[in-house]
Image (cartoon, helix red, strand yellow):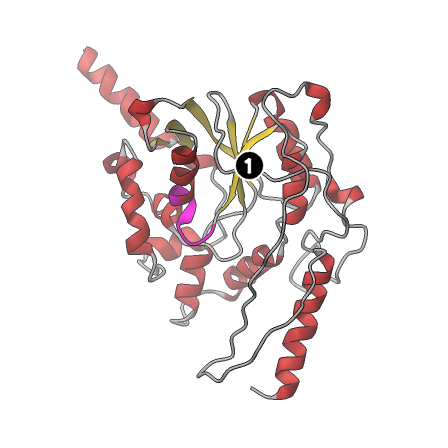
Amino acid sequence: ATEADLAAVLVGARATLDAAGCHLVGGHTCEGAELAVGFAITGRVHGRSPSKDDGDDAHPVASPATEHHEDHHASSSSSSSSPPTPTTTPRWGGLAKGGLRAGDALILTKPLGTGCVFAADMRAQAPYATVRAALDSMLASNRPAADVLGASACSACTDVTGFGLLGHLAEMARASNGASIALDLDAVPVLPGAADLARRGLVSSLHPDNLNARRAVSNHEAVATDARYALLFDPQTAGGLLAAVRPDRAAEAVAALRDAGYARAAQIGVVVSAGDAQDFPAVVEVRTSSSTESSSSSSSTSTC
């Protein structure tokens, strides 16, 4: 890499960091076989996150589409809209990983699949449209989504990164002193083409380790052959947020997230129970329409 390459990387980094209200204060360079860049982020949480004891008026759902990113970056030719871009300071405090409550709706802000997509891309087996969709998703900042969730009676939240959705969901359950969760596989958003890549065995090198989280899945054998199930263990780069929101606010929160630019945001499950020692650290049932129909069919057969 040349000094011009380094300058271009830093210009792009500064543009992104400045938009997030983050200052680049130093760094160093080193030599390597490939061009790489990384940042160590240090900060403080101001204020507090909404509490489960706060009243309805304390959690107005506000879309940052009109409040937090009036300035938009130019869209690429393959994308119909800009990634969500924050420009102002949020009004909420931190969103904690623990705090799941029985009845909470689970919301995911971005589709899964970046691990599979780029594992396939390294083998020149990923279609351009699939890679482009993954890049567009990765370029979307989580800041506007956090603004929405922070104003939506959110009881717990984490980002979905290297441990995959199930790994990070298990972390939330552990931090909540154990939880039982029903996950709707049909509702989980995935990148276009990602399930097909997973079906072909094109997965990240981190995928085998992430499969350890299957110990939390109560019906693993029933869904193990579904390619979408494999994506629950897919390590994400610049993945979305996984949040627990009070059930009467879930639809409103999803609508606000979509208005803010997260077109694939969806409710993907529900917290059945929380804080129960018998569920520690986590019990997850992965439900699908096919598994439900199979279960109903088996029940009918045994009844006859």
- How many marks the image carries: the answer is 1
- Residue at 63%, 53% in the rendered image: 141
Question: Relative to the observer, which residue lies in front, 259 or 27?
Answer: 27
Q: Is residue 173 visible?
A: yes
Question: As drawn, is 240 to the left or to the right of 144?
Answer: left
Residue at horizontal 50 percent and vertical 51 percent from the top: 191
Type of amino acid under label 1:
Ala
Whether 118 is drawn above or below 37: the answer is above
Instruction: Residue 223: name its quadrant.
Output: top left
Does the magenta portion include 189? no
First to last magenta residue range: 161-167
Question: On the image, numbered disc 1 is attached to which residue?
Answer: 266
Image coordinates of residue 272 in percent, x first then y, are 41, 22
Residue count near mark 1 (Cα–Cα under 10 Å), binned few <14, some 14–19, many ≥20: many
Q: Furthest residue to the top? A: 304
Front position in the image: 214 or 117: 214
- Can residue 243 be seen in the rendering of this structure? no
Where is residue 94? Give x, y as percent: 61, 40
Q: Residue furthest bottom?
A: 2
Of the pair 206 and 178, the residue shown nearer to us: 178
The residue located at (36%, 60%) in the rendering is 204
Residue 91 screen position, x and y as percent: 73, 39
The x, y position of residue 245, in whole percent, is: 56, 29
- Residue 69 vertical placement versus 56 (above, below): below
| Placement of 167 over or under 235, stated as above or below | above
Q: Tell me the quarter of the image containing the N terminus.
A: bottom right
Q: Secondary structure at mark 1?
A: strand
Residue at the spot x=46%, y=83% of the render?
A: 32
Q: Is residue 261 left or right of residue 213?
A: right
Answer with the quarter of the image where residue 277 lies.
top left
* On-image quarter of the C terminus: top left
